[in-house]
Image (tube, rainbow, N blue to C red):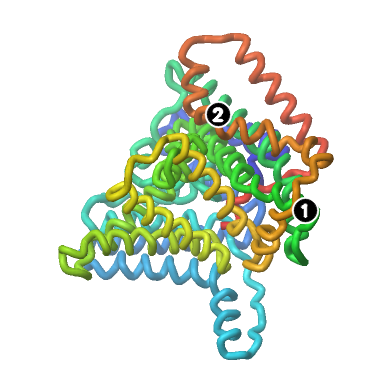
Amino acid sequence: MLFNDYPFLLVFLPASLLIFRLADPYPQARIGVLVLLSLAFYAYGNPPYVLLLIASITINWCAAFAFGRFKLRAIPLAAIVLNLLVLGFFKYTNFVASNLGWLAGEPVPHLDIVLPLGISFFTFHHIMYLVDLRRGRAPLYAFDRYALYIAFFPQLLAGPLVRWSEVMEQFGRKVYVPGWQREFAVAICFITIGLVEKIFLADRIAHNIDPVYLQAQVGVVTNGDAWLALAFNIQILFDFAGYSDIAIGLGLLFGIKLPFNFNAPFHATSIQDFWRRWHITLMNFLRDYVYFPLVNARVLPRRFLPLQSQAAMLITMILCGLWHGANWTFILWGTLHGVALVVAALWRRHGPRMPALFGWALTVIFVLLTGVIFRATSLEAALNIFQGLGYALNLDRGKHLLSLAVVPLIAFLLPASQDIIAWLTKRPRPWLFVLGGFTLFVILLDLGERNVAGFGYFNF
């Protein structure tokens, strides 16, 4: 079930709000109802894998309970390893097997393994909680509360990645209290902006650049359209930021405040600033659960701590790339960004001050170029696009593409959606709410005229 299709918007969401409204007066029912609604949401598109989700929740909660009972630090560690093994099986089995076969000179049969939606995200939620539990920072929770933390449907499939400390105490609170209408209006604003980002921006760009990447799979893009491929990072920004904004809005409808995930990343004046603004919750996870442990590990003498920090930065970004998918393109993309972060850190320490405008231009160019590697299906396809940049852009085709003018200006100039909504809600503006209602009506009409496109991060 997609956030941008009729079954969700016209059936599941209204029905869920009605059911939750009926349960809201009863404290013992609120969490259980949300858990059941979340499981129903997950089961809609892939019924067998809801059993995997239930088993994952049960096993990890039992591990947490056993740790609380016996205080054996090996228990949560074993659960973390098991989570990673399950994720690795579904996500990396064929990748590892094909590379081993290549090294051995023998072809390896491709296994028919379907990646369960959201497995990367709910695995990381388990890991965050278990690591903090093992460190003595997280308490034990009742099964239903823990199940909702993992399965809460707005963030289940593609985030934002939410720490237990950010939401656990919100679960079970009464939602329909005096003033709930304002939160409801803010939620609708987030959902509307998210749908606009996805349907009118991301999908429009994808319609124009997807054929370019298909062409790159068979040869060099020689007609000048290779330049269009550079718009991928802008497409994925609006695709994933749109998903995140919808998720935040949906969370508010049920009384849960989820963290923001994007903060106008194309305003960044350095690569470090870019990664502080892009997929914020993932980068916070990698910082606290990968980078800091690598930096704090006693591997090198203290005088080599800067070198260890730089190595940790590079390893973290390589793992970030690998997390996005089982392909050498993702590994190369992560490596390049890791190297860029290391170079930027060295420059900040030893080089002259870089003008903000030059830093912005350098960051945008680097991000757009490496985005080609991220999107391409192979290193050869990425090379075919880069070679195609030697051909002039076909202006007769390009002048009609929204992705070449208006959409980049939105990415480069407008503030983050949460800042826009803060401005909208600072004081009542009736005409804006009328405009928002009309926009939502147009979105629903548009969805009925075409095939609904899935969100890009469902693949990760």
Q: Work out whether 382 lies above or below 19.
A: below
Which residue position is annotated with label 2? 413
The percent position of residue 343, horizontal first and vertical second, equals 38, 55
Q: Which amino acid type corresponds to the residue marked 1 in the rendered image? A: Pro
Which quadrant of the view contains residue 201? top right
Which residue position is annotated with label 1? 211
Q: Which mark identifies residue 343? A: none
Sequence-wise, which precedes: disc 2 or disc 1? 1
Q: Which amino acid type corresponds to the residue marked 2 in the rendered image? A: Leu
In depth, the one of 393 and 426 nearer the eye is 393
In depth, the one of 76 and 290 nearer the eye is 290
Left or right placement of residue 283 versus residue 220 in this view: left
**Point 56% across, 68% down: residue:** 328
Which quadrant of the view contains residue 62? bottom left
Instruction: Label 2, secondary structure: give it.
Output: helix
Q: Mark 2 touching mark 1, by CB under 8 A?
A: no
Instruction: Label 1, secondary structure: give it.
Output: helix
In depth, the one of 180 and 216 nearer the eye is 216
